[in-house]
Amino acid sequence: MAAWHGVRVSDLARAVGADPRADFVEFRSFDSGYDSSWDAPSARHAQTILAYGMNGQPLTPGHGAPLRLYSGVKLATRG
């Protein structure tokens, strides 16, 4: 199990003055063509981060370096 660390999306949104009334948040990468639209409650969840590290180390390109969108609430669970 990985331990991710980074900046909460909710903290970043507050710092840049994002509109709290928005229903959705769009994420786009600059280099790989990744884009995704999330519902605002999931994006603002405390577990949703822009991760720059995993397991005490900086991210590697194989794990999305330099920054990766991560949220435990968006992961599928197995029953």
Image: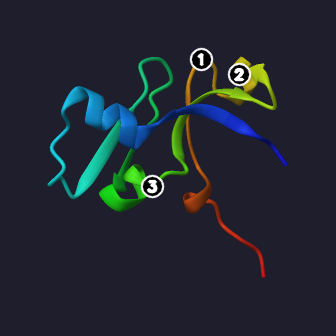
Q: Position of residue 6 (x, y in %)?
A: 58, 30
Looking at marks 3 and 1 on the same chain, the residue that comes earlier in the sequence is marked by 3
Q: Secondary structure at mark 1?
A: loop
- Are there few (<14), some (14-19), or many (20+) residues within 10 Å of tag 3? some
The image shows residue 43, relative to residue 8, as above or below, that is below
Which residue is label 1 attached to?
A: 66
Q: Which amino acid type corresponds to the residue marked 3 in the rendered image?
A: His
Which residue is label 2 attached to?
A: 59
Question: Could you tell whether 79 is left or right of 12 in the image?
Answer: right
Total label count?
Answer: 3
Q: Position of residue 48 (x, y in %)?
A: 51, 47
The image shows residue 1, relative to residue 13, as above or below, that is below
Question: Could you tell whether 71 is left or right of 54 in the image?
Answer: left
Which residue is label 3 attached to?
A: 45
Looking at marks 2 and 3 on the same chain, the residue that comes earlier in the sequence is marked by 3
Q: What residue is drawn where x is 18% and y is 32%?
A: 17
Q: What residue is drawn where x is 31% and y is 56%?
A: 40
Question: In terms of depth relative to the viewer, which is nearer, 34 or 17?
Answer: 17
Question: In terms of depth relative to the viewer, which is nearer, 15 or 75?
Answer: 15
Colour setup of the view: rainbow
- Are there few (<14), some (14-19), or many (20+) residues within 10 Å of tag 1? few
Question: In terms of depth relative to the viewer, which is nearer, 76 or 6?
Answer: 6
Give the Cα separation between the discs numbered 2 and 1.
6 Å
Q: What residue is drawn where x is 59% and y is 17%?
A: 66
Q: Position of residue 33 (x, y in %)?
A: 44, 28
